[in-house]
Amino acid sequence: MLSFRCPRCAQLVFFENTTCLRCGLPLGFDPGRLELVNAEGALHCANQREAACNWLVTEAGTLCRSCVLTRTRPDDADLAAMAAFATAESAKRRLVFQLLDLGLPLRSWEDEPGGLAYDLLSSRDSPVITGHVDGVITIDLAESDDPHREQIRQDMGEPYRTMLGHLRHETGHYYWPVLVERRGKLDAFRALFGDERADYGDALDRHYAEGAPTGWENSYVSAYATMHPWEDWAETFAQYLHIRDTLQTAAAFGMRVEVAEEALSAEPAVDVDGEPFEAILADWLPLTYALNAVNRSMGRDDLYPFVLSAAVVHKLTWVHRLTVTPA
């Protein structure tokens, strides 16, 4: 995420701000310019009240570039679900900002069949399974509740679980056909991630019955990534977005960490087909080392609880190439 300043008084403001706390100027996010701008007289997203959306639109009564991607949401009368909906939409706006900033193709379900759509549903009255099918991403709004999500994280033995993480992972599934299948990259994908034609249902049953194989850390970024090549792709794609967003934020605020290379125990950076990933890792490894140390000083778990093996770096490098190379 970039850093933003009030266009009137230059006070630092957050991405979510609707008003400058120093001078009182109304603020709104312009998705065309990717900037927080003076919102005096501007048109706000129709979800300004329902989702606390501060994005601007060009036509009155319409939804912004982020909110328009939501196909289904709770009824206005369900106040608890609507509060969770607002939290989920806030995380989704961060994701959509990043997708726009990276220049990734972003077509909504209203634009074309199979376009990106989000069904944000409450599991309070009936079960909701978070997942992706043919461009439609379903998210259980219960994941907006910190105690509920933390309990599931512990039950599942996961090192990390957030609403933004869910959105990045499931959106990774949407981008698999966009970046891999339609670009004719299946052979290269299978060489790195495995054959996605393996039966998904069988893989799912096997994963929950047997767990991740011994030594999975050498080839995968998470235990869940071992379940099926599609999940390995989605987990890797999400990690790539984590890394790029965090580094952008650190750079925007002038953060720089220098750690002697020999002090880092992570695997060395690698080069895939002449497209190096060293530049990103050279910034990422010292930053996460320092941030994890700071968290431990506060008695907290590691901020970034993942190890990037050489095999995972190969996969991240490949995702990087697909992301920065025009279609």
Image: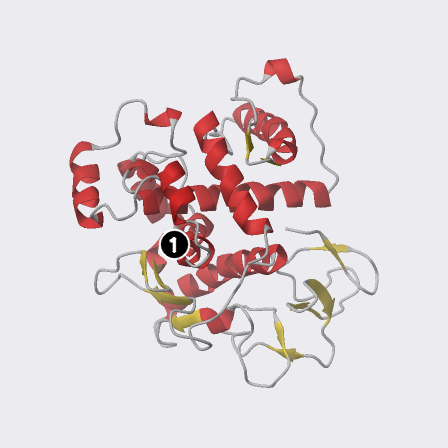
For the point 49% across and 69% down, the residue is: 107
Identified by mark 1, the residue type is His
Establish if 81 lies above or below 164: below
Local SS, label 1: helix
- The residue singled out by tag 1 in the image is 173
Q: Nearer the viewer, residue 135 or 86?
A: 135
Residue 243 placement: quadrant: top right
Is residue 309 shown left or right of residue 289?
left
Establish if 247 lies above or below 114: above
Looking at the rendered image, the quarter that the C terminus falls into is bottom right
For the point 61% across and 60% down, the residue is: 16
Question: Can you give x and y, in whole percent of width and height, for residue 31 in the image?
Answer: 64, 67
Q: Nearer the viewer, residue 298 or 107?
A: 107
Question: Can you give x and y, in whole percent of width and height, for residue 318 in the image?
Answer: 50, 41
Q: Which scheme is used to colour this image of the protein?
A: secondary structure
Question: Can you give x and y, in whole percent of width and height, for residue 211 in the image?
Answer: 22, 33
Report the residue that reaches farthest toward the right: 9
Q: Nearer the viewer, residue 322 or 308?
A: 322
One can see residue 10 in this view:
yes
For the point 47% across and 77% down, the residue is: 111
Is residue 204 shown left or right of residue 173?
left
Local packing at callout 1 (Cα closer than 10 Å; few below 14, some 14-19, many 20+) is: many
Q: Nearer the viewer, residue 314 or 16?
A: 314
Residue 222 placement: quadrant: top left
